[in-house]
Image (cartoon, rainbow, N blue to C red):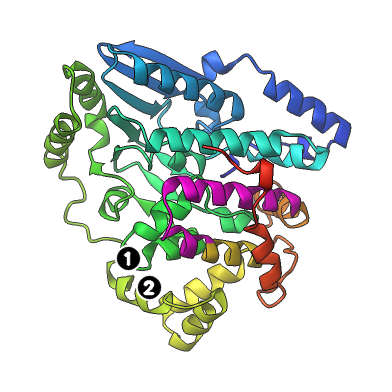
């Protein structure tokens, strides 16, 4: 999950933080932060925080979940469309500010936000009616969770996808452990560890999006979607296919990683993060050296957690992955000595030089990683 708006409030005393968190949780502004409409037989969700790049918070999550459940049972609702307000973003991530403040104040938001978000992710992943995410803009972290598990994800030339969590002491959650290892070869592991950004048609080429439609056709596409009468998934797919066929923008441009695909599969085929680093150093190519530099900036603990997460997730169902990721999220919240200073360095002070603890891969013990994956007993996520 990625923070978008960060203020000096992070430096307030613990009591002030807790007061702000409680105000955040009691917010009644969800009516303006997320909008619900019935247009024809379609339920339309609009994430409505454009100044915050539609960053997802707990209040929004708590309104989206019951609305999806309601529409799922409503015989007059045939499909669901989710989109973001404004010109820049679908959803650029989750509200890390509130989580970081909660962690330092000992507030339950560190459990509530992750639990409710992952339950929502699972609801989207198991939704029975056609679910169409129009990811026309920045789509990161929590925004990926709102879209990638749905049956249809429509990217445009404005789409910017990334899972940058290893750079802030976290891991690519919201089901990243499920969809990332299912991308071709070692691409998912590469994206998870490095936070590499994909843009436009490339988001569809790798399978994060199901379709690519030019941004200037999205309004027309949405109108045609809501005009469909009792559509099946195949009806929606046929309409999206037709719009994709009309969208020739960047069709001739090669995939951004086309020349590096074989190298990624070779260099990231390893039994540990240390082996990957060794492969990159031995390779010595410009691409390999670039990735070595990138990984060296990331949290060593996050890299090891993410490597294991992707390994385990390849053999799990989405539900099993979300249970695993909830355990990891709570481990990360306990590890605020790593997460909170990194947040300051990367997102507030902007010196891009977080002080990780431990500071090296060798300093992260296998026992410490193993403990992060341990059951929480009664506190485990229940889906």
- Tell me the mark number nearer the camera, choosing from 2 and 1: 2
Does the magenta stretch mainly form a helix, a strand or a loop? helix
Give the quadrant of residue 197: bottom left
| Up-down relation of residue 345 to residue 286 (above or below) | above
| Up-down relation of residue 48 to residue 378 (above or below) | above
Badge 1 element: loop
Left or right, residue 290 beside residue 81: right
- Extent of the magenta region: 309-335
| Up-down relation of residue 349 to residue 81 (above or below) | below
Picture coordinates of residue 109, whole percent (x, y)? 70, 34
- Which quarter of the rendered picture does the N terminus lie within? top right
Mark number displayed over residue 130: none
The stretch drawn in magenta includes residue 199? no
Left or right, residue 222 beside residue 45: left
Give the quadrant of residue 166: bottom right
How many numbered markers are drawn? 2
Q: Is residue 194 visible?
A: no
Q: Residue furthest front?
A: 378
**Mark 2 in CB contact with mark 1 (< 8 angstroms):** yes
Give the quadrant of residue 60: top right
Left or right, residue 300 beside residue 215: right
Badge 2 element: helix
Left or right, residue 158 beside residue 322: left
- Front residue of 185/351: it is 185
Picture coordinates of residue 230, whole percent (x, y)? 18, 18
Mark number displayed over residue 257: 1
Q: Which residue is mark 2?
A: 264
The residue at 67%/38% (across/down) is: 111
Mark closer to the chain start, 2 or 1: 1
The stretch drawn in magenta includes residue 322? yes
Picture coordinates of residue 32, whole percent (x, y)? 53, 15
């Amino acid at each position: 999950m990625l923070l978008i708006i960060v203020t000096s409030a992070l430096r307030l005393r613990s009591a002030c933080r807790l007061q702000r968190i409680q105000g955040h949780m009691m917010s009644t502004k969800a009516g303006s932060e997320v909008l619900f409409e019935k247009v024809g037989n379609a339920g339309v969700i609009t994430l409505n925080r454009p100044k915050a790049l539609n960053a997802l918070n707990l209040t929004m999550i708590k309104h989206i979940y019951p609305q999806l459940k309601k529409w799922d049972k409503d015989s007059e609702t045939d499909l669901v469309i989710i989109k973001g307000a404004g010109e820049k973003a679908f959803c650029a991530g989750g509200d890390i500010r509130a989580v970081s403040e909660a962690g330092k104040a000992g507030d339950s938001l560190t459990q509530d936000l992750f639990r409710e978000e992952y339950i929502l992710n699972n609801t989207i992943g198991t939704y029975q009616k056609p679910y169409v995410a129009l990811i026309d803009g920045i789509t990161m972290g929590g925004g990926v969770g709102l879209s990638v598990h749905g049956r249809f994800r429509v990217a445009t030339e404005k789409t910017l996808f990334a899972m940058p969590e290893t750079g802030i002491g976290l891991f690519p959650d919201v089901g990243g452990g499920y969809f990332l290892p299912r991308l071709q070869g070692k691409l998912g592991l590469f994206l998870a560890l490095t936070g590499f950004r994909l843009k436009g048609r490339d988001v569809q080429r790798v399978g994060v999006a199901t379709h690519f439609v030019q941004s200037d056709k999205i309004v027309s596409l949405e109108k045609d979607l809501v005009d469909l009468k009792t559509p099946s998934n195949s009806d929606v797919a046929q309409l999206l296919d037709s719009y994709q066929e009309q969208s020739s923008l960047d069709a001739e441009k090669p995939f951004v990683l086309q020349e590096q695909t074989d190298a990624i599969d070779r260099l990231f085929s390893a039994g540990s993060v240390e082996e990957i680093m060794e492969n990159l150093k031995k390779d010595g190519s410009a691409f390999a050296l670039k990735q070595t530099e990138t990984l060296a900036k990331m949290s060593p603990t996050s890299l090891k957690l993410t490597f294991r997460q992707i390994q385990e997730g390849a053999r799990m169902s989405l539900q099993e992955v979300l249970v695993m990721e909830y355990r990891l999220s709570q481990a990360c919240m306990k590890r605020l000595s790593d997460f909170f200073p990194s947040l300051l360095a990367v997102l507030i002070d902007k010196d891009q030089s977080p002080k990780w603890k431990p500071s090296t891969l060798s300093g992260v013990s296998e026992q410490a990683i193993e403990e992060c994956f341990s059951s929480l007993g009664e506190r485990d996520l229940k889906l």
